[in-house]
Amino acid sequence: MAIMTFVPWIGAIGRLFVCVLLATTAAGASASAGEPIKVAVYPFELEDFSAAGGVVATDERDAKYLAEATQEAKQWLADSGKYTVVDTAGAEDEAAKSHTMHSCSGCVGPITKKLGADQAAIGTVTRISRTEYTMLIQFFDADSGEPVARYFTGLRMGADYSWPRGARWLMKNRILAKDGG
């Protein structure tokens, strides 16, 4: 009976180890050498699942707040000293131009590699309704194209003007937290 109560703890410890390993991987090998990680921060993207649906940042307000959220992320990463932000303006691939990097099925690694970055950061705002949003910021390895870290927050009872605040909160409290990436 004692073994049966111990077994779930083994799984929990294993999951904790994997989380720590992912966080360490997100920091990358160059961070362990003391060099900042070169990260391409792509413009934040919008998924719209609201009743109006189908809108992909065509609204002026949406575009404005997505740009502000992107700028917050870039500024926090650059100011951290852990990252060097790589300009993504030169990305000529369709997914980068059409702001669909979050759903491009394997294009993130090659596009990021072409820009000379070690990692990609892709922020996605999901509109559930006009007052309910979520934000996901994912980091991808440029060599493998695989995700190395994911950070999520809900923006309930907010509005599009809360998107930069959500990016700032994730940077401060999750991504760049004292023991974080």
Image: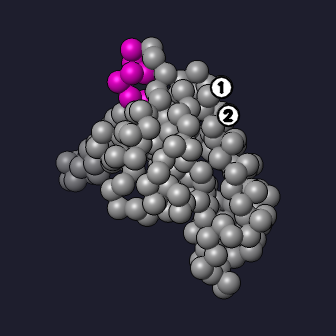
* Residue 8 visible to an observer of this rendering: yes
Q: Is 55 drawn above or below residue 6 in the view shown?
A: below
Question: What span is in magenta?
Answer: 27-33
Q: Could you classify mark 1 by the number of other residues whose Cα lies within 10 Å: few (under 14), some (14-19), or many (20 or more)?
A: few
Residue occupying image coordinates x 38% and y 29%: 28
Mark 1 and mark 2: span between their CA atoms?
6 Å
The percent coordinates of residue 46 (x first, y second) are 61, 64
Does the magenta run of residues contain 29? Answer: yes
Query: Is the stretch drawn in magenta largely helix, strand or loop?
Result: helix
Under tag 2, what secondary structure?
helix
Colour scheme of the picture: one colour
Q: Is residue 6 left or right of residue 46?
A: left
Which residue bears the numbered disc 1? Answer: 79
Does the magenta run of residues contain 108? Answer: no
Q: Could you classify mark 2 by the number of other residues whose Cα lies within 10 Å: few (under 14), some (14-19), or many (20 or more)?
A: some
Q: Is 132 drawn above or below residue 116 in the view shown?
A: below
Residue occupying image coordinates x 30% and y 39%: 143
Q: Is residue 84 left or right of residue 144?
A: right
Residue occupying image coordinates x 36% and y 33%: 25
Under tag 1, what secondary structure?
helix
**Can you tell which mark lies on residue 103?**
none
Q: Residue lying furthest bottom in this view?
A: 51
> Mark 1 is on which residue type?
Asp
Q: Is 135 drawn above or below residue 75 in the view shown?
A: below
Q: Is 30 drawn above or below residue 162 in the view shown?
A: above
Q: Residue lying furthest top in this view?
A: 34
The percent coordinates of residue 47 (x first, y second) are 58, 69
Assess whether mark 2 and mark 1 are in contact (beta carbons under 8 angstroms): yes
Which residue bears the numbered disc 2? Answer: 75
> Mark 2 is on which residue type?
Gln
* Residue 26 visible to an observer of this rendering: no
